[in-house]
Amino acid sequence: MTIEKATVFVIRKVNFKDSDYVVTLFGRGSGKFAGIAKGARKLESKFGGVFDLLNMVEVVFYQSSGLDFISEAELIENWEGMRNSGEAIDAGLRSARMVNKLLEEGQREIKAYDLIEETLSSLDESQVRSRVVELSFYLKLFRHLGYQPQLMECSRCGRPVEDEDPIKFSPEAGGVVCTKCSTGNEFQISAGLRKVFVKLIRTPQSKVKRLKVTENQLQEGFTLLDRFGQFHFGQKLILRAGSSPEPL
Ligand SMILES: [Zn+2]
C-alpha cells in the first residue's frame, strides 16, 4: 500500500452512502482523481468543511480497489474573498466544473493546474470584473489542452486574415477564415473581439482585469468559446455569460 500526499483543488463533491463524500480532486502532480472521504458528512468529522468546492487542500491518501481512500485532509486556502461575492464564486465554480468536464480521470495537466490556481487567486484578491477572468480562463484552458482558436491566420489556407470587421470564424476549421476560403457557413466575430482574445492570451490571469473588454465583447466571447468548445470537445459546455453553475 503506497501512501501519497498531494496539494489539490476540490472540483466536485457528491454524497456517498450515509455519511461519506466522494470528491474529485485535481492536483499539480497527481492530476484529476476521485477519492472517498469516510464519515466526512458527520458533524463531528475530523474533515470539517475542508472539502468545500474550490478549496485548496493537502490530502493524504492511499490506493484502494477503485477509489482512493483519503485518510487526512488539511485546508490550505478557502478563498474567503471570492466567497463574499456571488459573481466571483460563480465564476470560480464554473471554471472548476470545466476542468472536471474536460479532463479525464488520471489526466495530469500542470498548466491547467497553475491556471486554475491563478484564476482563483485573482477572483479572491478582488471581486470586480470576474467574468473577464472567467472568459480568459476558458480561452487559456482550451489552449493548454491543445485547442486554441486560430486568430491571426486563416485556418484553411494559412494566409493572414486582415482586420476586416466582422471576421469570419469557423469552429470546424479551428478559427478565423479569410474571404477567399469562406464557404458561407462561418459565423462572424467582431475585429474587437479578436483583439481582446489576443490580449487575454498574452496577459497573465492576475492582470486580465485591467484589460478593456466591453459587455458586448464578453457576451460575444463566451458565445464563441461555447461553440468552439462544443465542436472540439464534443459535449455541451454551457459556458454562456451569466449562466448559473449547474450542480457539480
Ligand atoms: Zn483562407
Image: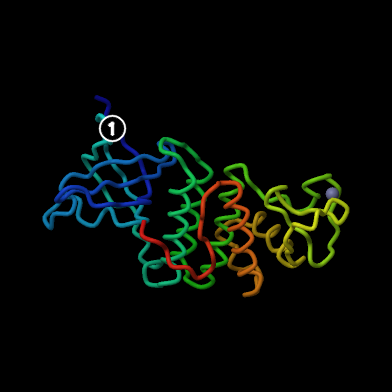
Residue with the mark numbered 1: 66
Q: Position of residue 78 (x, y in %)?
A: 34, 59
| Mark 1 closeness class: few <14, some 14–19, many ≥20 residues within 10 Å | few
Q: How many marks?
A: 1
Viewer-proximal residue, 104 or 114?
A: 104
Report which quarter residue 131 is drawn in. Answer: bottom right
Colour scheme of this structure image? rainbow
Task: Identify residue type, mark 1.
Answer: Gly
Report whether 226 appears left or right of 168.
left
Q: Residue furthest left?
A: 44
Q: Is residue 243 above or below residue 55?
A: below
Residue sitting at x 57%, y 52%: 230
Q: Residue furthest bottom?
A: 215
Residue sitting at x 44%, y 61%: 92
Report which quarter residue 208 is drawn in. Answer: bottom right
Q: Secondary structure at mark 1?
A: loop
Report whether 10 appears left or right of 102.
left
Q: Residue furthest front?
A: 184
User: In what quadrant of the picture does the C terminus appear?
Assistant: bottom left
Q: Is residue 60 above or below residue 116?
A: above
Report whether 153 appears left or right of 119.
right
Q: Position of residue 42 (x, y in %)?
A: 13, 54
Q: Is residue 17 above or below residue 82?
A: above
User: In what quadrant of the picture does the N terminus appear?
Assistant: top left
Viewer-proximal residue, 64 or 173?
A: 173
Q: Position of residue 115 (x, y in %)?
A: 52, 50
Residue sitting at x 47%, y 53%: 98
Q: Does the numbered disc 1 mark a residue whose Cβ is under 8 Å from ligand 1?
A: no
Q: Position of residue 209 (x, y in %)?
A: 58, 67
Residue sitting at x 69%, y 60%: 199
